Every structure is written in C-alpha cells, then in structure tokens.
Image: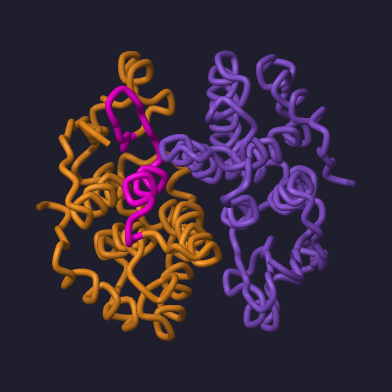
Chain colours: A orange, B purple
C-alpha cells in the first residue's frame, strides 16, 4: 500500500473508522474533504471519478478506489493483529461489522445526521415518520451490544479487532443522537478500554 | 468445519445465499426452519439459544453460532476459490457485500417482504411512507450494478466470488418486489452466467 488517500467528510463516523484503523497500524493517510451538506459527493465529477454510489468514505490506494467504510477498514488491517487469524473468529469479527451496517448505523448514525447536521425541521414527512422506529432500533442495538460486552472485553475473538473500531465510531457519538450511554455500563467500560489504547485518536484529532 | 447447521427461513434470500455458497463448495448443510411470519425467531428460546438479534439466518458449526448472512458466506468460503487471494480484490469483494446490506437488501428485499409476505394492507403507516424512497433506492442500486456489470463479467476480481452470490440472492428475486429486471440487460446477462455455473442451485432446490 502506497499513497493512501481518504476521501472523506471529517465529521462522519464512517470516515473516522478508517482513520482510527490507520492510526493503530501507523499508516499515513492523506485526507481529501467533501462537504456532504453541500452535495459535494453527488456531483457528476465525484460520481465518475470517486464513487458512483455518491458516498464517502472512499479509500484510494494508488489508482484503486475502495468504497464502504468497513471494507476499507478490513483492507488496511488484513494480515495485521487487528484481524484474527482463526477462521471462525475472523468471520465473527465480520459478523459484527455487517451487523453494524444493518442494525446500528442506519439508526444511530442516521438519527445523529438528522438531528445534528440536517436539522429536524428540514426532514421530509417520510423521514420524520421513521424517527420512532429508528429510536427503538437504536436502543435495541445498544442493548444487544451491552449484553454482549458484559460477558466479553471486546466484540470478537476476545481481543481488540477491526469490529471494535467499526462499532466504536458511532457508538461513542450516540449522545449526539440523544441516546443516553450511561444506561449501558458495559458499553461505557468497553469505550474506555478502547480510548486508552496507546495509538487511539479521537474524531477531531 | 463439521456438523454445519443452517437456522433459516427457506424463502429468505439471505438464507439462500449461504445454501448457494455451500453448494458451490460441496459442503453439506443440515437445515432447521423457523417461520418468521409466526414470530418463531423472536421467542425467548431463539433469542437465548440461537441469535439475540432475533433474525435468521444463523450458521451453526458445532457449538459455535454465526449470524449475519454475508459473514456466514465468508466463513464457508474463506480460503476457497470463491474468495480472492489478492488483498485489494478481497476487500473489493467485501465492499460489494457491505454495499448489499446497506443499499440493496433494505430496499429490494424489504419491499419483497412487504409485498409478498406481510402484505401491503398489513403495513404500518410509517412503513407505507417508506415505500417510495425504498423503490427509488432499489432502482438506484440496480442501476449501479448494471453500469458496473456492463464493464465487468462479475462484481469483483474479474471472476465469480462470494460477492456475486450475495448480490444474486435478492437481485434474482427483485421481480417479486415489482422491479423490472429486463430494464437492466447487464444484470440479466450476469444472472445467466451465475445460473449456468455447474454447481448452481435455485432458491427452492
């Protein structure tokens, strides 16, 4: 890997995941910003040259482009101590990363986006109608994590892996979507374990 | 891997993915059915013994349980010819699998579930309000796949991988959600390539 460039929106938790993986591995990342609030990832140029799906993050390695935050995290960490060697444990790590994109991110990250960036007044009626379900699904996701982390120090393989990074990103921002993390003591303890790791960096670092 | 059991709902595309990977690899799978329409994956027993997330599929290998369809597919195929050896190509395969769970399944599979299994009359008002957005997002997902498959025989790595299986599952069922696949000739040709592979099996096989 040479000349890694992260195409990103700096406040995005999905982009932060990739920076956090890179920090743990000591990999330098060049960063290129797009303002998603101004539609900069939906321009004809972005769709043609960066991601036809119109989303950040995209990780660029030389001339090759990789979309989807969790795939980019896996790419950087593949073969490192952040990915388990054991076949079942590696799949279990991926299970948490797929679960994050289906059960956690669309609820907690989307509510954060709507409440803190878009603004509730600017939502469509169809979006407003989803808030209650997203709130309930977000609470369920946090509850499931908390139950698991009561019995396990990290999500998969008994140690810190890419899955912890992918779930940490939006979990530690859940208060910005008015989720009360104090109700989840095992999550709070797990976040503390992550934030005190030697190479940890914050969203704004 | 010994004594593989698939906990499933047979009509689910997510469960079919795992059966299709197993068929290509010649792995025997025992199958245990749950009727999601009767809430059989939300019982206290299922939540305790199979999946605290209340969903199928779950792949069982001996005493170990693995939820999330795409993680289970990766587990079965890890180290086989269905997963690229090249690090970037492996991550690019995962990129399509994450994209499927975020951009394709919640739109195309959910509309199929609502239209063919739940019934539009039984939807909540909040669900009904989402139909238009899910329709548009489903069309966008199919358009993106079609554009990509115009230039590539398979989704990643220039050959048949787990990503093709994970995307085939609900794409080939999209007509059950009233998507007109004839509008996507590159998708139709790709599905034909997949369905004529020697070890292919159908959803009902």
The answer to which of B128 and B52 lies nearer the viewer is B52
- Relative image position of residue A112 (x, y in whole percent): 30, 53
In the image, residue B68 sits, relative to residue B102, either above or below, namely below
In the image, residue A63 sits, relative to residue A181, either above or below, namely above
Residue occupying image coordinates x 65% and y 46% = B110
Residue A67: say if magenta.
Answer: yes
Residue occupying image coordinates x 69% and y 69% = B60
Residue extending farthest to the right is B205
The answer to which of A174 and A19 lies nearer the viewer is A19
Q: Is residue A199 left or right of residue B120?
A: left
- Relative image position of residue B190 (x, y in whole percent): 69, 23
- Relative image position of residue A204 (x, y in whole percent): 12, 52
The answer to which of B14 and A44 lies nearer the viewer is B14
Residue occupying image coordinates x 22% and y 54% = A25
The number of callouts visible is 0
Which image quarter holds the N terminus of chain A? Answer: top left
Residues in magenta? A56-82
Residue occupying image coordinates x 31% and y 14% = A45
Q: Is residue A91 left or right of residue B9?
A: left
- Relative image position of residue B88 (x, y in whole percent): 41, 36
Q: Is residue B120 left or right of residue A133?
A: right
Residue B183: say if magenta.
Answer: no
Which image quarter: residue A142? bottom left
Q: Can the viewer see residue A101 in this picture? A: yes
Q: Can the viewer see residue A5 in this picture? A: no
The answer to which of B107 and B124 lies nearer the viewer is B107
């Amino acid at each position: 890997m040479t000349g890694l460039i992260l195409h990103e929106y700096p406040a995005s938790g999905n982009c932060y995941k990739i920076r956090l993986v890179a920090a743990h591995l000591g990999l330098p990342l060049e960063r290129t910003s797009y303002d998603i609030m101004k539609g900069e990832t939906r321009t004809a140029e972005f769709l043609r040259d960066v991601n036809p799906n119109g989303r950040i993050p995209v990780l660029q390695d030389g001339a090759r482009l990789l979309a989807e935050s969790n795939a980019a995290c896996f790419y950087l960490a593949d073969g490192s101590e952040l990915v388990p060697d054991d076949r079942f444990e590696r799949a279990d790590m991926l299970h948490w990363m797929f679960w994050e994109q289906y059960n956690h991110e669309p609820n907690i990250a989307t509510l954060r986006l709507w409440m803190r960036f878009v603004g509730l007044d600017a939502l469509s009626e169809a979006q407003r109608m989803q808030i209650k379900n997203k709130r309930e699904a977000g609470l369920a996701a946090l509850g499931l994590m908390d139950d698991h982390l009561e019995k396990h120090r990290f999500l998969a393989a008994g140690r810190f892996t890419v899955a912890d990074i992918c779930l940490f990103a939006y979990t530690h921002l859940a208060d910005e979507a008015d989720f009360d993390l104090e109700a989840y003591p095992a999550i709070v303890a797990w976040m503390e374990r992550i934030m005190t790791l030697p190479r940890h960096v914050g969203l704004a670092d």
